[in-house]
Every structure is written in structure tokens, then in C-alpha cells.
Image (cartoon, rainbow, N blue to C red):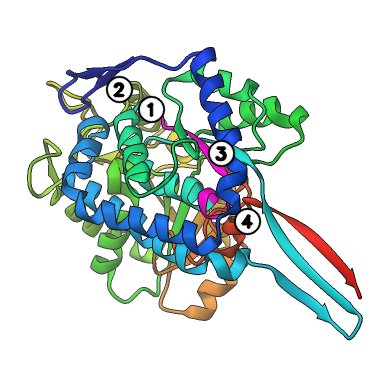
Amino acid sequence: MHIINPASGELIREITEDNHETLGAKFQLLKNAQSGWSALEIKQRVKILQDFSTGLKNQIDMLAAVLTSEIGKPLQQSRNEINGARTRIQWLAENAEKYLGDEEMTKTSDLTEKISYDPLGVICNISAWNYPWLVGVNVFVTALLAGNTVMYKPSEYAVLTGFEIERMLKQSGIPEGVFQLAVGARKVGELLLDLPFDGYFFTGSYKTGKYIYEKCASKMVPCQLEMGGKDPLYVADDIVDVKQVAEATADGAFYNNGQSCCSVERIYVQEDIYDAYLREFVNTVKSWKIGEPTEAGVYFGPMTRKAQLEVLEKQVSDAVAKGARILTGGKRIQGKGYFFEPTILADVTQDMLVMKDESFGPIIGIMKVKNDEEAIQLMADTEYGLTAAIYSSNKQRAEKMIRQFNTGSGYWNCCDRVSASLPWSGRKHSGFGSALSHAGLLSFVRPKAWHMHS
């Protein structure tokens, strides 16, 4: 397997993929180690994961450089990701004992009723490339805290970071058989689906997630999916500072080159402020630097996957053919690497690909609407249900809209954010199940009811 630098198109490293035999041996290690790992007190597991977080802090520059080399993410954004992962680890570690410890429900002179939480066992985590630290931590840290052993398959586009995750965990005290790396692309993923794991946790596209879910159905084990999004955002006419809102929402659309499942992918703006918002939005995006991700001050690096350039070109040509205006960008940048101009399309309509299909790139369609009712109708017109946002100065107006969002997360005057204390979940084609918060911790255990008569 070839690891390619997306900023240059050059080979970084060749890696040997796992096969049926090596994966089987790794699975057996995990199975043999699981009972011993779960027998440790939660406090001991917490301490190891806290040490892991400290290690990330101490080696952040090296880890960020590795991430940038294979993903193309600007260095500061790579550092931000690792720091964000540490924040999530902190919350999960601090709350693990609270939510995973035994719960006494009834206590009388002759009866005790309680709930205990057993780990699922050996779990398989098939992860994503766009935020390998963040989406990885959501699963493998939580699973380890709950007493599971983990087979972690990083995306083939984030294998070097996967190696660093494994190294740092074992350096922090994770036993050899508790965490194993599965290295490879689709073929390795297929082999993992044939192994008798006690749970599957996937982050990635809807197409792949649906396939995994269907393949795992006969196993009768948990299968949690975090998939794509076509996340909408509405800018109401009562916002006070158009420039500030334009800057915040542009960042929500273009951060990490738009390569995020919760990136803003569709913007609806009330007609009275449409022109002013467009002007400020364009000015903001044009002010951000495009270039080598290792250069200081760069906001836009290369796309991670070369194939996505064609997807973006198709969306642009479809939009223009149907009447959209290109306000900036619209094409790939010639030269080495997988660069695409940040692209803003105005006067879009709901039938355009850019408003229907996941873009996963630096492109946004902005559409004029008459009122809140039209905005709600258009925002709901999607197969996805991950996040949705409203910007307004009126809290009551915002809350009324958020209650109507059929999404896992609703935002008021913010967007493209995840909090460790809140569940991260999707609806419809965005998946199901929860990561993070107490709900995420409970996703990795099975409750046992205790009926104790004296």
C-alpha cells in the first residue's frame, strides 16, 4: 500500500497490508487479553488513558507533522485536532466511573436491585481519515475505558497516524493484546467483517456504512454507524452583525477544506440580507491563504483524496448549467498536489447536486429564501440528518426551528462543533447510535440487572 502526500503527490512510504492470517492472530490476542483488561478497576484504565492524553501534549508537534504529511491538513489545524482529542479524552476519563460504575436502584431491608455494566468484549473500530484523532478517540478511548479490547482500522489515508496512535497507547501502558491495528484498505475491511467481533463501530460514508450494517446483521451484535451529512444552515434577517456571521459560517463551511461530516454544506439566507451576507462571505473566504499545509498562516491545504476533485468539478458544472453564479473559485488548481479553489456558488436551487449530494470539499451553495417556513422546508429536504444550524438574534425563534430539525445536533449562533459532554449521533442516512457523553460511554457496555434477596 502506497502512502501519498496530497500536497505533492509524492510517495511517503510503502506499507504491507494485513491479511487473513495476521488479522486472525491479532484478533486472538485481543480475545485472550479482554478478560484481564476488563478485570482492572476503572480507575486504573482511566489513569492509562490520561497518561495517553499527556503523551499527546508532549509530542504534539511531531504528531501534527505526521498527520499533515498524509492528510494535507494545515499544521495548525492538525495541532487543533490533537488538542481537541485531548479535551474529549479528559471528559471521558473524568466521567467514566460515574456512568460505568454499578447503579443501586432499590435498597430495602431484604431487597437490593442494581445495574452493572459489562463490556461488549472485543470490538472492531473502522475509522475515518478526515479527523483520525477526533473520530478515533470517540470510539477507541471510550471502548477501552469500558473494558473492551479494540481492533482499530484507520483509513488507508491515515495509516501513519494509526501507527502513532498505537505507539502512544502502548507507551502509556495499554497491554499488547488490548489494542491492535488493522492495516489496509477495503480488502482488509472485508476480512474484519468475517471475524467474530462483539461489536462494530464505523465512521465514514453512507454507502460503506450501509454495506457494513447489512453484512453484520446476522451476527446479532451492536453495529453503530456515524456516516455522512448534508448539513444546512439558515441565516435569519434579524442578525445584528452580518460580517461576524459571515465569518463564522464561512469557517463552518470551509474548515479542514470542508472535509468534515458536520461541515456546513448548504446555506439558506433570508432575502432581505442576502446580498450583504454574500458580500461579506466572499470577502472572508478570499482573505484566507491557500498553499502548502506546512507554511504558516495557510488555511486551505490540498484535498486528501485526489478522486474528490472530480466530484467537486461535477457539482460546479451542474450548478452553473442550472443557473448558479460562481462568486469565487470553481476549479482545481493546476500544479502538484490535489488543490481545489475555495468555491462559492450563489443563486443556487434545491435541484442542484451541490445542494443534494455530500460535497466533502471547499465548496458551498448559498440560496435566498423568503422566510423561516421556506427555510425549514428546504433544510429538511435531505436524506441526511446529522446537524442543522440557525443564526438569529431571537432565542425563541431559534428554539422553534431547532425543535423541527430532524437531526442529531441543532445549533443556534454556532455550527460545525462537537462537545464531549453531548451525544454525537445521526439520523436517517447519517447513521445511528451515540458517541461521546454518557450515552457514548453506555454504547460500549451491556447492562445487567441484579435482583438480590437476603
Q: Earlier in the sequence, mark 3 or mark 2?
A: 3
Q: What amino acid type should be assigned to the residue bearing mark 1?
A: Ala
Q: Quadrant of the C terminus?
A: bottom right
Q: Nearer the viewer, residue 372 or 222?
A: 222
Mark 2 sits on what residue? 306
| Cα distance between the residues tagged 2 and 1 | 24 Å
Disc 3 and disc 1 in contact, CB within 8 angstroms: no
Compute the Cα span from label 3 to label 2: 40 Å
Q: Residue 216: x and y, percent?
A: 69, 29
| Neighbour tally class for label 3: few under 14, some 14-19, many 20 plus, Cα within 10 Å | many
Residue of label 4:
406
Stretch of the chain drawn in magenta: 143-156
What SS does tag 2 mark?
loop
Residue at the extreme bottom? 109
Q: Earlier in the sequence, mark 4 or mark 2?
A: 2
Q: Position of residue 200 (x, y in %)?
A: 61, 36
Q: Quadrant of residue 428?
A: top right
* Residue 101 visible, this angle: yes
The answer to whether mark 4 and mark 2 are in CB contact below 8 A is no
Element class at badge 4: loop
* Residue displayed at 27% across by 21% down: 3
Element marked by disc 1: helix
The numbered mark, 2 or 1, whose residue comes first in the sequence reads 2
Is tag 3's residue or tag 1's residue first in the polypeptide sequence? 3
What residue is disc 1 on? 321
Give the number of the disc on residue 33: 3
